Image (tube, rainbow, N blue to C red):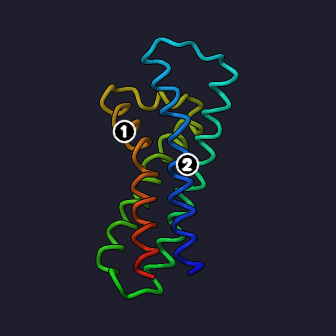
């Protein structure tokens, strides 16, 4: 039961991570101003939460894949996709830091920026889904 609960906690965290982004998106769509300090706090919470969900989710999925036979063939590709998503989000930021540039400068093309943003928006959702499935497999 503890193992299943861990998957649910990670999934719930993923929902809570997305909430500040959705609030900001809808306020922007309705042309409602948000104080920069409040926006910063919401984005910092989202960033920290995303890191916790992706790293905790990767660990949880890895542990489940290693210890459970049920649905392993489904969980392995999910785990690999989550690992790839986490790496894909992190690599441009590391490259930006190493070269002294900003993330937008590293993601200089519109296609790269949209791809990175799309992945940032769905990576934790995929991780949450994988963790729920992993909890059920346990």
Instruction: Please give the name of the residue rendered at 47% of the width and 11% of the height, measured from the top-left corner.
Output: 31
Cα separation between marks 1 and 2: 14 Å
Q: Nearer the viewer, residue 31 or 112?
A: 31
Residue indicated by mark 1:
118
Q: Earlier in the sequence, mark 1 or mark 2?
A: 2
Which element type, helix, strand or loop, lies under badge 1? helix
* Residue 131 in the figure: left or right of residue 112: right
| Relative side of 51 to 112, left or right | right
At horizontal 35% and vertical 73% (from top left) the residue drawn is: 76
In the picture of the structure, the residue carrying the numbered disc 2 is 50
Reply above or below: 69 against 31.
Answer: below
Identify the residue at horizontal 30%, vertical 74% (top origin). 74
Give SS at disc 2: helix
* Neighbourhood count class around disc 1 (C-alpha, 10 Å): few under 14, some 14–19, many 20 upward: few
Q: What is the number of the mark on residue 17?
A: none
What is the crowding at mark 2: few (fewer than 14 residues within 10 Å), some, or many (at least 20)?
Answer: many
Q: Is residue 43 above or below residue 56?
A: above
């Amino acid at each position: 039961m503890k193992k299943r609960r861990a998957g649910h906690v990670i999934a719930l965290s993923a929902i809570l991570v997305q909430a500040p982004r959705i609030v900001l998106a809808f306020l922007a769509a309705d042309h409602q101003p948000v104080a920069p300090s409040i926006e910063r706090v919401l984005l910092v919470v989202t960033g920290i939460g995303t890191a916790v969900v992706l790293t905790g989710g990767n660990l949880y999925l890895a542990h489940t894949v290693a210890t459970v036979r049920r649905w392993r063939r489904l969980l392995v590709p999910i785990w690999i996709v989550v690992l790839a998503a986490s790496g894909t989000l992190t690599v441009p930021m590391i490259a930006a830091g190493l070269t002294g540039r900003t993330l937008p400068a590293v993601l200089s093309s519109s296609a790269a920026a949209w791809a990175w943003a799309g992945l940032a928006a769905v990576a934790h959702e995929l991780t949450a889904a994988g963790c729920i499935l992993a909890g059920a497999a346990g």
